[in-house]
Image (cartoon, helix red, strand yellow):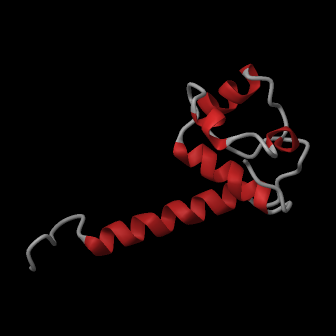
Amino acid sequence: MRSGEGRGGPSFAAHRACLTDRAVYHRAVNVSLDSLPKIGAPATRALNAAGYTTLRQLAGVPRADLAWLHGMGPKALNIIETALEQHDLRLS
């Protein structure tokens, strides 16, 4: 075993990153602009409390503003960005 490689070495980290990327993609595929993508309940509650109930409403919203919402994490933000990209839209 090389130095720095053991359990959870580079191959495990690469595998985990790939699984995370696939999960983000699958949660964002075929999301209507009239609904929110499948994100965690805390992130959905945070968006609803801030007045966002559809993906369309999130287009152009600064990513930093969404990141400040309590319950909104990096995975939810990635799912939202991926879903918006499918409609040629972006966060700002």
Residue in the picture at 55% in, 64% down? 21
State left or right for residue 89 relative to residue 34. Answer: left
Quadrant for the N terminus in the image? bottom left
Position of residue 68 relative to residue 19, above or below, is: above
Residue in the picture at 75% in, 40% down? 61
State left or right for residue 8 relative to residue 54. Answer: left
Which quadrant holds residue 24? bottom right
Residue in the picture at 80% in, 24% down? 51
> Residue 82: horizontal and vertical position, in percent?
70, 58
Position of residue 59 relative to residue 18, above or below, is: above
State left or right for residue 82 relative to residue 56. Answer: left
Position of residue 28 relative to residue 69, above or below, is: below
Residue in the picture at 82% in, 43% down? 55
State left or right for residue 45 relative to residue 87. Answer: left
Position of residue 37 relative to residue 13, above or below, is: above
Which quadrant holds residue 30? bottom right
> Residue 20: horizontal and vertical position, in percent?
51, 60
Which residue is more in the foreground, 66 or 44?
66
Please count the marks in the image: 0
